[in-house]
Image (spheres, rainbow, N blue to C red):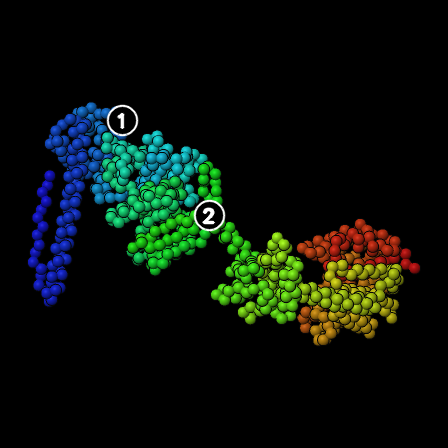
Amino acid sequence: MCDARRVTSEPATPAESPTAADTVALARIVARQRAELDRLRDLAATSAVLERAKGAVMGLTGCSPNAAEEQLQKRAEAGRHTLLEECWITLGSLAPPSAPAPEPDTAAFTASVSLPLREPAAVLESSAALATLGRELVHVATPQELAGCLLEHLGPEVGADAVMLYALRPGGGLDLIGHAGVDDELAAQWQHVPPLSGVAALDSLRAGEPRWLEDLEADRKRYLLIGDPPSRWPTRAWLPVPAHGPTATRTATAAAPGDVCIGVLRARGGPFTDETREHLRAVARLCAGRLRALDTRPPVSPDDAVDVVRAVFDALPGATMLLTPLRTPSGNVRDYRIDAATAHSPDVVGHAGRELVGRGFRECCPTLLGEPVWQGFRRALTTGEPYESEQFAHQEVVDGVAELSTYSVRAARLDERLVVTWVRHGSSDRQEQRLADVQRLGNLGWASWNLLTQEVTWSSQVFSLFGRDPADGPIGLIRLPDLALPEDASALTQAIAELLRAGRSFDVPFRARVAGRLRHLRAVAEAVPDAHGTTVEVHGVIQDLTAQRSAELALIESERAILTQHDVLRAERTLAGRLQHALLPLPTRPVPLAGLRVDVAYLPAQSGIHVGGDWFSAIELPNGDALFVVGDVAGHGIDAVASMALLRFTAKGMVITGSSLTGALARLNTLLLHSRDSHGTATMVLARYSSAERRLVWAQAGHPPPLLLRDGVVRYLDRPRGMLLGASATPAFEEAECRLEPGDRVVLYTDGLVERPGEGIDKGLTRLAEAVLTHHTEEPGSLAPLLAGMLEGDRRDDVCIVDIRVPVDPE
């Protein structure tokens, strides 16, 4: 054993100020004393490790203490280690209890304490790492510090990213006594593990063998994996700490090594190598001795007052706890430590009474950690004013039957601590609370008038409905109409009189002005007669119908507006329809024009109440040619009909007076741009047919192309250039020519025939071509089956079609 050196001090260096010199001298003395104290602690730790290692050698070889120390010294020199490192290597390399006992000779001892010799460099590196860990373990005081020390050591050695220490509970479950690399929230979730199957740590402790989890998908099926998500640590190892000798028993505050399991969690995949596995086993054996002296519970205040409170709490009924705040360096409360608890104060996993002492409140009662309760605790601790939470429902098991009960939490300050009590509310309290909830949610209140004692009782909600101060008290039944508007008071007065005279119940709506706002109320009352039929008491309900009445009035006003608008729109549609029929007369049979047979059809839209702007024109010109026009004005209603009439008559007049087709389109475009009566934009097809040459010249302004049927083949004419009328001040229009032959059929149409919602125009054009082929006939009236095949369901747009046929045998 080494002797401790005496602590000496040197004179302080003179300074400018005597006070400063004294301070500097005192600081130096304190620093030296601290350094000397650390040195003495290391010396004591070294002596303790040396004695344990000597004892191990003596037990294995049967030699004397001096011979054991000499043997350790020789082995250290041979391996180029320090004596302390050799001691830790010896202690860390002892065979597990299940291994055969070695022979008490030096050779057997050498074999039992030596690491495998197949990798000399790995052996030396592992030995040095274990020696370093051994020195660090001397200073570990709690299981939490042990977990941190192991993670610091195992991180670079085996790639560990987290370490968890679990201790076996007497009931068979596990308690998390230390962790590192794991966030507090996850640690709280896994603080207590019930005795379930499929828990790797519990399986390892029961079997006394490590569990190597190296295949995440396979391990998922076998074990309940820690982590959110479990893939955070694809590989993990659980190693039971071996118990050596009769000292490995559990005490009230220390964990027996045989009941502790070390979990090593890695963020990388791949199996554990043989060297890594052996190193982890050595680390588990190395921790066995240290765990016997560690306290596995949070420190408990030794305050004598707390001991007295615990004794009192043991005799108290109900659920009550004494909490001590645990503060962060900045002074904020991070948790509360339970210093005392009654026998009826269980946590979420079944601990109760003194089993909770020393544990954290967050761990034991996580369901009460909502913001209102937490802030209430802080306010009670700061101001000293008691706090009571809102009532909440909690399901508990009474005599084997699940029962839903109502609780609230009260907190009061006791010195620097809090006394927290769970208050269980009885059925009457629950009924009263439910009645209050009904009144609040239904926005109603009850009232009672005793006509014999003149006692009047109102619920708090009635005072709120009338905007009356409860300090002013309720008013009698006869004075109730005084609270209503004058125009509604008479009806309420009459109803009250009938109730008092004949016992007739009433249900009367009335209005009252409350805080400057008009409130719609409803009074419902019934009489309570005596044995002779005389009314002696009146029970009533006052309900606020303001929101409902406002909604009804708004609905009535909306219905009136809709009906008015509907009438206006119907009148507009009727007028527009009459104008359209007057301006656009429809022939009842095919019309001969310039040697052609022309058939026309017009179908108004079925959806909506507006009249559209589709139109056509088919006339014979003075020189014997024929003019065909099909157009579509954007919009509906009277404005669209007016624009249609403007374009229809103007186009005919321009062509009759000698304008070309493109010139007519250009002038119509200018007319739409500058006319106040115009209705936006329009599309149009102008076609002029010369009977002598059978030549059809046509131009278009943003309109679908004409369809030509010849010899059983359908095609659309190539569109010349042309843009929407009314869209640009400088449009460009071109003409196209097509020579017709006997038997040809040309169809002009508006987009309502080919367009459908949610469908491209190309599909509509293809459908029209197929319908023309399918329903083609030389008989008059062939447009009806064509339209029936094209139009399905409710039409949203007008449809106009001009069917032009060249006779096979001209007359």
Circle nearer the N terminus (2, 1): 1
Image height of 550 relative to 340, above or below: below
- Circle 1 residues within 10 Å: few <14, some 14–19, many ≥20: few
Choose mark 2 or mark 1, whichever is in front: 2
Residue drawn at the location 14% of the way across and 35% of the way down:
73
The one of 29 and 160 positioned closer to us in this rendering:
29
How would you rate the neighbour count of disc 2 (Cα within 10 Å): few for under 14, some for 14-19, many for 20 or more? few
The disc labelled 2 sits on which kind of residue?
A: Gly
Q: Which residue is mark 2?
A: 426
SS at mark 1?
Answer: loop
Q: How many marks?
A: 2
Residue 241 spot, x, y in % from top left? 29, 35
The residues tagged by marks 2 and 1 sit, at their Cα atoms, a distance apart of: 63 Å
Front one among 425 and 256? 425
In the rendered image, residue 600, in percent from the top left (x then y), is placed at: 83, 61
At horizontal 33% and vertical 55% (from top left) the residue drawn is 413
> Tag 2, which secondary structure?
loop
Quadrant position of the N terminus in the picture: top left
Label disc, if present, on residue 99 of the rendered structure: 1
